Image (spheres, helix red, strand yellow):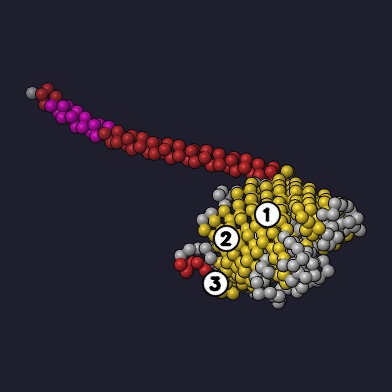
């Protein structure tokens, strides 16, 4: 009996110990599972951080590579641009060019001039929402070397009038005195914007009082102006006006195309001995006899410009038809002109540029070019300009150029000895 009691007690004690051990093992198994789950989460976090660090390292290496390529191609990046000078709400800026000009004996600078080539000041001020004042004061220009200070552009601009019917930038309006929106070269002819020092032989531009509508829609743009048409900026000498228009199209971000048309209107041969439109180194002028009382010119031009990083190519071809009312004969003249231009950055900020331009006047018309001879009819005139430039930054460019020019006169002779060497520092602030 004693043995049975002892065995029973031992079995009971062993059962209790077994249950306790089972509970402990179960607790250990749960703790182990929790630790394994934490380790898995930590491993996932480590893997994610490793991928992020690897991507960051690749991005940094790519940025370093892009910077080195940019540095090699264009030099050190420019410092941040400073804000233009302002007085109250009036913004003041300016640009121009100073340099050395030496031509052959019959050219514009036969005695090797050191001079101010251009100097202009610009004023810009907001007046109301989308209403602005813009003014230009010409301190010195190549075309008016001895005329002193005179007024350039000055107009009120009403921007984005079309916003009132939900069409942004479709209609804008200017009224005052402005450059005639004919062709494209006039927009690049100031010293700092021009990659060369000379202009094309045709170099069409005009500064006249009037009104202009302009705008853009998708890839299209336009400008339409009515202006006085003569050289007198204060008093129009005839009732007829200059009407000029341009339509532009940008099929890609790099290519710009445009077509322009202009009629000078009827000009008085006595009170307007030259027109308001600059062409061929001078203004259009009457060529009829003393009995001629009126004359006019109708023009058309096609332009193309393709731009890429570090360069561009541009071309234009145009026609001008001159007519007058000379009772003694038919003085109509067909005038054809064109230019080809290219510019390419070679190394860092050094670039080269070239332009060839020509004017054909089969029956003879005065094309002055760079010659000192005024009013001599020519049949053909051409100009070749070759230049180098170094753009230090967006405010200063140093340029040098040699220009060849030759003309065949209507009387059978030739015009030579007008070649020009020039060195110019163009600035903008």
Span highlighted in magenta in the image: 8-25
Local secondary structure at mark 1 = strand
Mark 1 or mark 2, whichever is nearer to me: 1
- Label 1 belongs to which residue? 318
The mark that comes first in sequence, 1 or 2, is 2
Q: Nearer the viewer, residue 394 or 23?
A: 394
- Label 3 belongs to which residue? 129
The residue located at (74%, 61%) in the rendering is 331
Relative to 134, 98 lies left or right: right
Numbered label attached to residue 300: none
Relative to 405, 166 lies left or right: left
Few, some or many residues within 10 Å of mark 2 (<14, 14–19, 20+): many
For the N terminus, the quadrant is top left
The residue located at (61%, 54%) in the rendering is 258
Determine which quarter of the picture holds residue 133.
bottom right
Is any part of residue 243 visible from this angle?
A: yes
Distance Cα–Cα, label 1 vs label 2: 18 Å
Distance Cα–Cα, label 3 vs label 2: 23 Å
Distance Cα–Cα, label 1 vs label 3: 39 Å
Is any part of residue 387 visible from this angle?
A: no
Residue 281 x %, y %: 78, 60
Residue 391 x %, y %: 74, 52
- Label 2 belongs to which residue? 222
Residue extending farthest to the bottom is 235
Judge whether residue 14 is colored magenta. Answer: yes
Mark 1 or mark 3, whichever is nearer to me: 1
């Amino acid at each position: 009996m004693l043995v049975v009691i002892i065995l029973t007690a031992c079995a009971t004690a062993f059962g209790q110990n077994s249950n306790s051990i089972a509970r402990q093992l179960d607790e250990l198994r749960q703790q182990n599972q929790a630790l394994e789950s934490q380790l898995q989460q930590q491993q996932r976090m480590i893997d994610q951080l490793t991928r992020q660090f690897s991507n960051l390292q690749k991005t940094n290496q790519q940025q370093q590579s892009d910077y080195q390529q940019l540095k090699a191609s264009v030099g050190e990046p420019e410092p941040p641009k400073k804000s233009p000078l302002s007085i109250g709400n009036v913004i003041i800026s300016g640009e121009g060019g100073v340099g050395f000009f030496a031509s052959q004996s019959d050219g514009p600078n036969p005695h090797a001039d050191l001079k101010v080539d251009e100097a202009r000041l610009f004023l810009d001020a907001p007046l109301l929402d989308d209403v602005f004042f813009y003014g230009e004061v010409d301190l010195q220009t190549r075309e008016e070397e001895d005329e002193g200070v005179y007024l350039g552009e000055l107009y009120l601009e009403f921007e984005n009038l079309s916003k009132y019917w939900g069409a942004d930038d479709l209609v804008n309006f200017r009224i005052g005195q402005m450059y005639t929106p004919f062709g494209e070269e006039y927009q690049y002819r100031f010293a700092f914007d021009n990659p060369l020092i000379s202009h094309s032989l045709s170099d069409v531009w005009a500064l006249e009082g009037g009104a202009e509508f302009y705008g853009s829609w998708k890839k299209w743009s336009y400008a339409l102006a009515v202006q006085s048409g003569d050289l007198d900026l204060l008093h129009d000498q005839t009732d007829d006006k200059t009407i000029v228009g341009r339509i532009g199209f940008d099929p890609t971000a790099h290519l710009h195309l445009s077509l322009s048309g202009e009629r000078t209107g009827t000009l008085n041969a006595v009170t307007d001995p030259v027109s308001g439109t600059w062409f061929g180194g001078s203004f259009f002028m009457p060529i009829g006899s003393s009995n001629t009382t009126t004359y006019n010119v109708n023009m058309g031009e096609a332009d193309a410009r393709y731009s890429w990083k570090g360069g561009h190519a541009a071309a234009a071809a145009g026609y001008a038809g001159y007519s007058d009312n000379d009772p003694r004969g038919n003085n109509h003249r067909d005038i054809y002109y064109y230019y080809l231009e290219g510019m390419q950055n070679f190394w860092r900020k050094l670039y080269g540029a070239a332009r060839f331009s020509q004017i054909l006047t089969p029956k003879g018309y005065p094309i002055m070019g760079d010659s000192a001879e005024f009013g001599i009819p020519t049949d053909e005139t051409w100009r070749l300009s070759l230049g180098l430039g170094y753009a230090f930054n967006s405010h200063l460019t140093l340029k040098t150029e040699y220009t060849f020019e030759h003309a065949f006169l209507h009387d059978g002779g030739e015009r030579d000895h007008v070649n020009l060497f020039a060195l110019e520092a163009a600035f903008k602030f």
